Amino acid sequence: MDNTTLPLHLSHVQKSSSIINRSHTLLHSTALIALIYYRIASFFQTTKPSDLPTTFSCLLVFTGELILSFIWFLGQAYRFRPVTRTVFPERLPENVELPAVDVFICTADPSKEPTLEVMNIVISAIALDYPPDKLHVYLSDDGGCSVTLEAMKEAWRFAKGYWVPYCRAYGIKTRCPEAYFLGEEGNTESSSGSEFMADRERVKVINDVSIDEASQEDKAEEMPLLVYVSREKRPSLPHHFKAGALNVLAKVAKQTWQEKKLEEVPEDSFGPLPECLLSSSYRPLRGQIREARDETTDEEGEEIEMSPRNIIADLEERKKKKDAARAKTKAGSSAGGPTNQEEVADENLAPGDATESVAEGSTAEANAAAIEATVTPEA
């Protein structure tokens, strides 16, 4: 069957789990109703003044039982009809416009969060199986440590020259270097052959030898953008810890593009699976199809099938509308006002904010830039 007619995702209802959960909910609800009836009836049977302390204690217990019963009731919604979803990212056509993604990584103290672990997380985020021009990785260093900045530069060189080409060539599923070399051998799609073993040993010992810049440029591939952000924190103003760091990252990321997905990666994890972004990309695409159904529903009122063919038709129409809107904007820019997205985004920065750009390589390799931003906290 043609891939253009196949669905992008399937939903499977777990019938056995659903029957068990519903039976348990029915029995538990019956027991709770009987208990509540017993508690209420016991209150009306108390007539002696000497039983008032006991009644007060029973009232406190009854209140606690009601609270716990309410909490249990709220948790039955997702157990009533358990569903397992299977997505097929390989069925996405090549010309589908995937949403842009920003990956936020936060760190503060190199003594508590070792720099080597942060480097592994950054490398695993850079190596995600997603279009490089749609993926930006932001690292927030609240400690402002120069060691972290230099470590990010080395991590970028290692990922660009060795790790990312190695993962893409052999279909490595574990994209975190530390987890990959500590794990089993069978985590690749093609893990046989002398060439694979030679490349694996070369990547494994690359930290013990100097990096050859010439060979790195020869093997360099298109890479996501890596941004290093260090904000200024004044003792007289609250910096809001990690929440403030995420706000600053969002402000810096807004200068890059407007429409994107956000993913926050903990600094103490091995990073997400390489295909997690493609697996979750069907949700925004499904939203676009739902928005277009009112305009593209046929006369019989049949629902549009969630297939790549319909996605392509819908996205092509939306792209034409966007191009027409951009043409009108460029025509009106001659009369004055902001002429590009960066000028509009700069209005959102405070007067005291400052950014410094540190780029490596030629201007053609714009994705090899690392931005060090110093942001004044808001009052």
Image: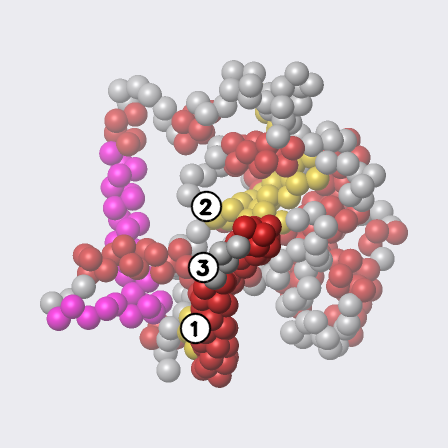
**What is the secondary structure assignment of the residue under circle 1?**
loop
Q: Residues within 10 Å of mark 2 (few under 14, many from 20)?
A: some
Mark nearer the N terminus (3 vs 2): 3
Tell me if residue 303 is in the magenta stretch: yes
Residue that label 2 marks:
260
Position of residue 69 measured from the top left corner of the image (x, y, whole percent): 51, 61
Distance between mark 3 and mark 2 Cα atoms: 60 Å
Distance from disc 2 to disc 1, alpha carbons, whole Å, reads: 31 Å
Residue 55: percent from left, percent from top: 55, 54
Dot 3: within a 10 Å radius of its alpha carbon, few (fewer than 14), some, or many (20 or more) residues? few
Residue 4 sits in which quadrant? bottom left
Residue bearing mark 1: 81
Q: Position of residue 234 (x, y in %)?
A: 67, 19
Mark 1 or mark 3, which is nearer the start of the sequence?
3
In three-dimensional space, the C-alpha distance between marks 3 and 1, rounded to whole angstroms, equals 40 Å
Residue drawn at x 43%, y 73% is 81
Q: Residue at x 38, y 58 (%)?
A: 285
Contact? badges 2 and 1 (CB < 8 Å): no
Mark 1: few, some, or many residues within 10 Å (few <14, many ≥20)? some
- In the rendered structure, the answer to whether residue 89 lies left or right of residue 153 reads left
Q: Amino acid at mark 1?
A: Arg
Q: Which residues are magenta?
A: 300-328
Q: Which mark, by number, is residue 44?
A: 3
Labelled disc at residue 104:
none
In the foreground, 266 or 95: 266
